[in-house]
């Protein structure tokens, strides 16, 4: 254990000691609260932790059923914060003065705060994140495929794959110079953007080997060499890299598409001090690296990649230099009505000859 952890943990323990030790009821995803991290936190703060594993749908349902009760800290994705708060009032504002903001990657912190602000109050800060972008055999497609629309280049004809799903529409829109997220509040503008993307995807159909449906299917296609360039998740690309050093995840020139699982305070939580102590504890780079090892995804902890396992660190740093991190397009909440527009576009692309 490093001097940094000891000093920070001493501070956390001191703050916890100033208040009564609390039981933190944590509603989270698998891998986000590993046993060794929980044990270290309990030993160093005096708080205890009760972990309930869940997913977005169950988290929102549990908090709705109790009006924000039953838990002291929860971890929904950032696009599940603003809407549920406006509709159901299931969270309480975060006191940012109690958060050690220096421990966060600044661009992620700012994006999450913006996407979880209701009125003048912030309701979420970032924790675990991941992206979708380009997974390719760089030896065969690396000189050609730099962005999503390059999947339509004749040089990779017949060796391309992506899903007929929302991320493909969004990625192509950004690569075409549009900003679909900025058009979320303007249905007519969003429809116009999606019509341009529809035309491009229909034009691109001849290049597509197949539209993949599941991650295992895509990984087999790439491993076999049937597909040399695709849209997929970062962790999938890094897994493939274990088998073939030429295959990896590449952040597109227009920006990878990012999701973030947050920290939020349920409206009726009873252990706020323990919740703030947990957030500050797990965002320490050395502790965050333990969570990456358990969950498989990186966190918004600044510098945590330096403490990751060497092979994973090398893959992460190759895929995400700082400029690529700062260029990630984080998914905001989806307004009502847009999914039906997207569904119609995808149906027409699927049916086109």
Image (tube, rainbow, N blue to C red):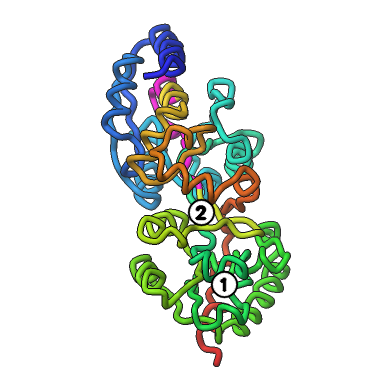
Residue occupying the point 48% across, 74% down: 161
Hey, which residue is sitting farthest bottom in the picture?
Answer: 353
Residue occupying the point 40% across, 44% down: 311
User: Residue 315, percent across and down?
Assistant: 47, 48
Residue occupying the point 35% across, 40% down: 293
Q: Nearer the viewer, residue 337 or 126?
A: 126
The tag on residue 131 is: 2
Near mark 2 (Cα within 10 A), the count class, few <14, some 14-19 or many ≥20, is many
Going from the N terminus, do you reach mark 2 or mark 1 first? 2
> Which corner quadrant of the image does residue 186 belong to?
bottom right
Q: In this picture, which residue range is highlighted in magenta? A: 260-275
Q: Nearer the viewer, residue 248 or 192?
A: 248
Locate the C terminus by quadrant.
Answer: bottom right
Dots 2, 1 in contact, CB < 8 A: no
- Name the residue beneath numbered marker 1: 342
User: Residue 152, percent across and down?
Assistant: 61, 77
Residue occupying the point 46% across, 26% down: 284
- Distance, label 2 to label 1, CA atoms, is 20 Å
Say whether residue 265 is magenta: yes
Secondary structure at numbered mark 1: helix
């Amino acid at each position: 254990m490093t001097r940094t952890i000891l000093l920070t943990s001493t501070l956390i323990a001191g703050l916890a000691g100033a208040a009564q030790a609390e039981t933190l009821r944590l509603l989270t995803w698998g891998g986000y609260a590993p046993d060794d991290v929980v044990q270290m936190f309990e030993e160093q703060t005096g708080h205890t932790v009760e972990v309930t594993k869940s997913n977005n749908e169950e988290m929102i349902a549990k908090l709705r059923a109790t009006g924000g009760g039953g838990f002291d800290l929860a971890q929904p994705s950032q696009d599940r914060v603003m809407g549920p708060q406006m509709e159901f009032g299931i969270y309480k504002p975060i006191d940012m003065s109690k958060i050690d903001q220096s421990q966060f990657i600044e661009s992620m912190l700012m994006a999450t705060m913006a996407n979880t602000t209701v009125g003048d109050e912030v309701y979420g800060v970032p924790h675990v994140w991941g992206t979708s972008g380009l997974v390719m055999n760089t030896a065969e497609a690396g000189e050609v495929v730099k962005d999503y629309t390059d999947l339509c280049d004749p040089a990779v004809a017949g060796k391309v794959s992506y899903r007929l799903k929302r991320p493909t529409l969004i990625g192509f829109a950004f690569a075409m110079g549009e900003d679909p997220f900025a058009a979320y509040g303007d249905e007519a503008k969003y429809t116009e953007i999606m019509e341009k993307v529809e035309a491009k995807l229909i034009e691109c159909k001849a290049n597509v080997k197949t539209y993949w449906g599941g991650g295992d299917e895509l990984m087999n296609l790439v491993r076999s060499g049937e597909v040399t360039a695709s849209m997929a998740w970062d962790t999938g690309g890094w897994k493939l890299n274990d088998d073939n050093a030429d295959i990896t995840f590449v952040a597109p020139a227009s920006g990878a598409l990012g999701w973030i699982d947050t920290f939020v305070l349920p409206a009726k939580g009873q252990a706020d001090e323990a919740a703030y102590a947990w957030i500050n504890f797990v965002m320490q780079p050395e502790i965050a690296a333990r969570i990456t090892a358990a969950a498989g995804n990186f966190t918004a902890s600044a510098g945590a990649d330096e403490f990751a396992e060497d092979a994973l660190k090398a893959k992460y740093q190759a895929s995400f230099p700082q400029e690529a991190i700062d260029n990630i397009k984080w998914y905001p909440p989806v307004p009502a009505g847009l999914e039906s527009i997207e569904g119609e576009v995808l149906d027409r692309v699927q049916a086109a000859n």
